[in-house]
Amino acid sequence: MTEHAATPRRGDHPAAHAPGPQTTETMTGAQSLIRSLEAVGADTVFGIPGGAILPAYDPLMDSTKVRHILVRHEQGAGHAATGYAQATGRVGVCMATSGPGATNLVTPIADAYMDSVPIVAITGQVASKAIGTDAFQEADICGITMPITKHNYLVTDPAEIPRVIAEAFHIAATGRPGPVLVDIAKDALQAQTVFRWPVETALPGYRPVTKPHAKQIREAAKLLVNAKRPVLYVGGGVLKANAGAELRILAELTGAPVVTTLMAIGVFPDSHPQHLGMPGMHGSVPAVTALQKTDLLFTLGARFDDRVTGKLDSFAPHAKVVHADIDPAEIGKNRPADVPIVGDAREVLADLIVAVQAEFDAGHRGDYTEWWTRLNEWKKTYPVGYEPAPEGRLSPQQVIERIGRLVGPDAIYAAGVGQHQMWASQFIQFEKPATWLNSGGAGTMGYAVPAAMGAKAGKPDVPVWAIDGDGCFQMTNQELTTCTLNNLPIKVAVINNGSLGMVRQWQTLFYNQRYSNTVLHSGPGHDGIEPPAQGTRIPDFVLLSEAMGAVGLRCERPEDLDAVIKQAMEINDRPVVIDFIVHQDAMVWPMVAAGTSNDEIQFARGVRPDFGDDLD
Ligand SMILES: Cc1ncc(C[n+]2csc(CCOP(=O)(O)OP(=O)(O)O)c2C)c(N)n1
């Protein structure tokens, strides 16, 4: 498998303790901050200045190594840092002032925490003497972000800045990655200090275990060769450890089927014959059912999220569980593990390959023939598909499928949250890691445009498409201005169904088709029955996009679909937004209704697959 060659491994970043001559210079705390960012290799910072952080913006102007991208809302800065990190494998950086600047970062920090994305958020704080006095623009951002950061720091002594920045990048990128916040009092930025580099870091209690225990690996390999119906249940941890190549070797060596969660999409090629698709609420029937019928849940860097398990006590009822994760707190959290393994997914997989080979050499080999007969039947009978749109209308799934086909698997796709996100995960064929960015754990509407912007800043030569909903787009579209002004020519496909589609789908299914507050347009049909007519679309996304310096295109008819996608692909000097007017009654299938068992999966509305019960 070809992986993005430039994607470094989790934890790779210029080490703070790299050998080299010691630098010792007198300067302000603010200068020390910028020098520290340069020293850890940060090349891009997304942010907005304000009073408390202002001292840092002055030396930032002179840095030739750190590019600052002035966003339009701090939420955009945070998601851009996340998009940058997910696309490049490096730590993303965002910066904001105290009080409201910092609190505007809360959503993207929570988002990065849920999805284990390495970002460092730097915030200005009021002067140290004013802390706790309800000073102008004071907010206790360390207190606020305590439960949504991997770690956070309040810095009041400028001498600490280099060490804290070095530690923040180290903590964000190593072990289970995550967001780290560094809050720096204004007087610490202004005071004179001595910048010393490299620094001694002091993290005695922080030593993530990456090398798995040999006995556990042997136990896991034994279970795998003795199982009749195993499944490799692969989560985002495998992608973050850049372990796609090792996963493929283990999968092909054993012949076991693979499911990849929403956060792992791309780490195993969608086109691979052993891939069953995505598990979970909108997963494929073969993936969901394989997990229900398996006798060995071979879990790698996944966390038994409720969207995957459905009703937990009915999940995978026949399975023994191997659970490998870099974070020991995940193991046994939702489902007890028969064989727990703590370690980095790449090292776990590398050791497993050797251990499985040793089992083979000793004459123990799993026979999964009957299992594959069953799996292949399910794959054939229950492929992911969709009903055609009413005559002459665009279907949202078709739009997304055609974008995937025409743009191809080398591009990066960022999704918002809702139906369009699920369709993008289902109908774009992903073949490579780090090409699918989305907000999986938090489900943050408004993620797509700024995340795409961050990805484009990190990977300027790769086409980046945001697949967005008309609801999501209205939350963060102002970052198109940032894209235009900073030469970040992303493409945005707005899947415009005139409504908050995913919520509307739940109203259709569970609230008797009473569409309370999910219609986004004002014209005839604002009852949600008819699609929005020309002239009643407020805002007009084409005009809105053009106002921000982007090219605005619209597509309403199936016969224009390919031409408009190709037109967008040819524009590379500005962002492009395509307003796809799609029919509003399309629904995401398959579906496991919230709180029910995965056994209740519906392939289409009211259609339950028939598996027989001989495997129960
Ligand atoms: C910030 C935030 N607010 C509310 C929600 C709840 N929510 C989930 S999906 C959705 C609708 C999204 O609508 P749209 O962007 O138009 O996408 P569609 O489902 O129509 O594809 C809403 C409101 C959320 N996930 N995030």
Image (spheres, rainbow, N blue to C red):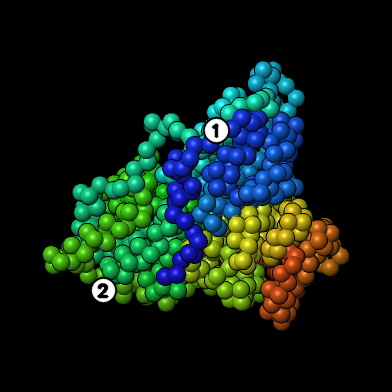
| In the image, farthest residue toward the right | 535
- 286 vs 46: above or below: below
Q: Residue at x 68, y 36 (%)?
A: 56
Answer above or below: position of 256 versus 391. Answer: above
* Dot label at residue 24: 1
Tag 1 secondary structure: strand
Q: Is residue 455 left or right of residue 338?
A: right
Residue lying at 66% horizontally and 33% vertically, measured from the top left:
30
**For the residue carrying disc 2, how many other residues have a C-alpha within 10 Å: few (<14), some (14-19), or many (20+)?**
few
Residue that lies at the very extreme toward the left in this rendered image: 362
- Left or right: where does residue 288 sit relative to residue 44? left
- Report the quarter where the N terminus lies: bottom left
Q: Residue at x 29, y 52 (%)?
A: 322
How far apart are the two marked residues, 1 and 2, measured between alpha carbons? 66 Å
- Place of residue 331 in the rendered image (x, y in percent of width and height, measured from the top left): 35, 44
Q: Nearer the viewer, mark 1 or mark 2?
A: 1
Type of amino acid under label 2: Thr
Query: What residue did someone put label 2 on?
Result: 369
Q: Nearer the viewer, residue 442 or 608?
A: 442
The answer to whether any part of residue 547 appears in the image is yes
Instruction: Name the amino acid type tagged 1.
Output: Thr
The answer to whether residue 470 is visible is: no
Mark 1 and mark 2 lie on one chain; the one further toward the N terminus is 1
